[in-house]
């Protein structure tokens, strides 16, 4: 058992994949490095911080109003979030040199374009700006990596940050975005300045929070045995304001938690990281499936063109 190994040997085993990543070229193998982090090194951490990045992406007032207007995230919530998970996972698993990775980006573009077109068919004038697209791209990377830096079992390396930047920059290029930041640090500055300038409470954002908060509750309670899930979900919901931070609390209209609760949540996540670092061996198998099973596609047997709302999908005969 890993627990019984001498400390030096345990450390060598625990950091073996980091040494593998350090031997890779982040300018060429960036998607492979991102996948290793997501599926092997930090799967739970990235799932948790990735959920928080999702809330950042729906919080800006103009985005929140459009999402409520389309109705997909408030009326077809589970399917909308399943579709997002599928398309993002296809880009992470396959990268952008593969047909499936590129098809997933094209399908995301198609969904966004058709959603706006459908809303505007009634004579309205909605649009998604280049800056808003850039912010969603930026927060998907920046917020996820910040969560790993804070609560992961080890710090991220420069290799990993560079690989993440290259991966998301290429995604932005395939989406046809303009003025994409030229470095990870520029992404961070753009992200933080957008949050400072744009985030404010709207009833639409509050409605989106109420519709989607189960996602982060599921992440926090997914490891519990079935008998403990109901109580665990109640506890998790009480902890959410301490997890999401002041920017999101302001946007969603959540009350500020007590400083004691914030410190308790922070300590619990750091203790978990210490447990993983000291006692768990490196993961040998991916924590993620090849394809994402959902209620609509329980066997994960979807084609990329079938994923999304009705206005953007093709149907099998």
Image: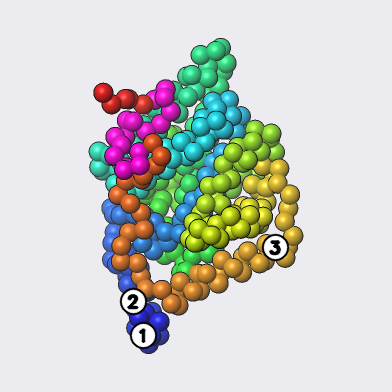
| Residues marked 2 and 3 touching at CB (< 8 Å) | no
Magenta residues, start to end: 297-312
Disc number for residue 5: 1
Q: Give the residue pinned by disc 2.
A: 13
Residue 186: x and y in percent read 50, 49
* Residue at 53% across, 19% down: 119
**Quick one: which residue is furthest to the bottom in this view?**
6
Circle nearer the N terminus (2, 3): 2
Report if residue 134 is visible in the image: no
Circle nearer the N terminus (2, 1): 1
Disc number for residue 261: 3
Horizontal side, residue 270 vs residue 108: left or right: right
Please state the total of marks drawn on the protein image. 3
Q: Nearer the viewer, residue 14 or 172?
A: 14
Crowding around mark 1 (Cα neighbors within 10 Å: few <14, some 14 to 19, many 20+) is: few
Crowding around mark 2 (Cα neighbors within 10 Å: few <14, some 14 to 19, many 20+) is: some
Q: Nearer the viewer, residue 147 or 302?
A: 302
Q: Is residue 55 above or below residue 275?
A: above
Magenta-drawn stretch contains 307: yes
Q: Nearer the viewer, residue 309 or 108?
A: 309
Q: Secondary structure at mark 2?
A: helix
Circle nearer the N terminus (3, 1): 1
Mark 2 or 3, which is nearer the eye? 3
Cα separation between marks 2 and 3: 35 Å
Q: Secondary structure at mark 1?
A: loop
Residue 63: x and y in percent read 57, 33
């Amino acid at each position: 058992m890993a627990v019984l190994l001498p400390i030096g040997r345990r450390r060598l085993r625990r950091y073996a994949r980091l040494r593998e990543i350090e031997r890779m070229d982040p300018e060429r193998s960036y998607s492979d490095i991102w996948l290793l982090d997501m599926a092997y090194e930090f799967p739970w951490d990235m799932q948790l911080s990735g959920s928080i990045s999702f809330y950042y992406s729906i919080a800006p007032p103009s985005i929140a109003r459009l999402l409520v207007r389309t109705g997909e995230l408030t009326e077809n919530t589970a399917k909308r979030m399943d579709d997002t998970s599928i398309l993002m996972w296809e880009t992470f698993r396959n990268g952008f040199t593969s047909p499936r990775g590129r098809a997933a980006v094209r399908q995301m573009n198609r969904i966004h374009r058709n959603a706006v077109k459908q809303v505007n068919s009634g004579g309205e004038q909605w649009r998604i700006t280049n800056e808003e697209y850039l912010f969603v791209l930026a927060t998907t990377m920046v917020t996820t990596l910040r969560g790993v830096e804070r609560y992961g079992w080890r710090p991220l390396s420069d290799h990993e940050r560079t690989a993440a930047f290259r991966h998301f920059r290429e995604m932005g290029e395939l989406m046809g975005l303009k003025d994409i930041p030229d470095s990870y640090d520029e992404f961070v500055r753009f992200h933080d300045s957008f949050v400072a300038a744009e985030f404010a409470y709207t009833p639409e954002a509050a409605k989106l929070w109420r519709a989607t908060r189960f996602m982060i509750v599921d992440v926090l309670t997914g490891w519990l045995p079935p008998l403990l899930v109901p109580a665990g979900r109640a506890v998790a919901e009480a902890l959410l304001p301490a997890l999401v931070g002041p920017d999101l609390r302001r946007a969603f209209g959540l009350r500020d938690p007590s400083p004691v609760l914030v410190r308790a949540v922070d300590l619990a996540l750091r203790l978990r990281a210490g447990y993983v670092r000291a006692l768990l061996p490196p993961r040998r198998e991916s924590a993620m499936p090849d394809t994402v099973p959902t209620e609509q596609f329980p066997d994960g047997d979807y084609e990329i063109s079938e994923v999304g709302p009705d206005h953007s999908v093709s149907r099998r005969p």
